[in-house]
Image (tube, rainbow, N blue to C red):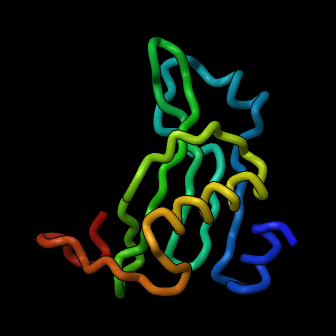
Amino acid sequence: MNQAKFLRQKLGRQYAYRQYYSGRQLADLPKSVSGVLAASLTAGCLRLDAVVYPKDGQMALGYEFLVRQRETIDWICFDSPDDAVILKESAMASVLERVRKKYHLTYTDCRFPELPGKRKGEH
């Protein structure tokens, strides 16, 4: 069973994958675009986003690994894995699992407290 299917079965409604842009659509974006979310995979209190960012005057895709803060709906960018970005759900699920294991995290235990000075609902 692939990682995406396993997570979907294990987490149910806490699992979501969404691809916002195809590779072709990304190629058609203006070169000055930055911070565009190409795809996102949420699994419990962990999330992996594929984001467009500028690099050497070009557009590049990179991953951002985020963790949910305890008792809030806010996310903290925890790492930026340097894996080659593949927008397919199965590929993103494999990267998410690798990073989860690297930091000894779980999909269901939100270990990160609310950031100091930040009030609930503030972004």
Q: Residue at x 14, y 72 (%)?
A: 116
Vertically, is 116 above or below 9?
above
Which quadrant holds residue 52? top right
Place of residue 115 in the rendered image (x, y in percent of width and height, measured from the top left):
21, 71
The answer to which of 109 and 75 lies nearer the viewer is 109
Q: Residue at x 72, y 86 (%)?
A: 10
Vertically, is 102 above or below 44?
above
| Quadrant showing the C terminus | bottom left
| Quadrant showing the N terminus | bottom right
Q: How many discs mark residues in the rendered view? A: 0
Place of residue 108 in the rendered image (x, y in percent of width and height, measured from the top left):
53, 86
For this orientation, the residue located farthest to the left is 117
The answer to which of 2 and 45 lies nearer the viewer is 2
Place of residue 66 in the rendered image (x, y in percent of width and height, measured from the top left):
45, 61
The answer to which of 118 and 80 lies nearer the viewer is 80
In the displayed structure image, the side of residue 2 where residue 78 appears, left or right: left
Which quadrant holds residue 61? top right
The answer to which of 106 and 18 lies nearer the viewer is 106
Vertically, is 105 above or below 34?
below
In the displayed structure image, the side of residue 64 where residue 22 appears, left or right: right
Q: Residue at x 59, y 46 (%)?
A: 50
Place of residue 68 in the rendered image (x, y in percent of width and height, measured from the top left):
42, 73
Q: Residue at x 54, y 64 (%)?
A: 47
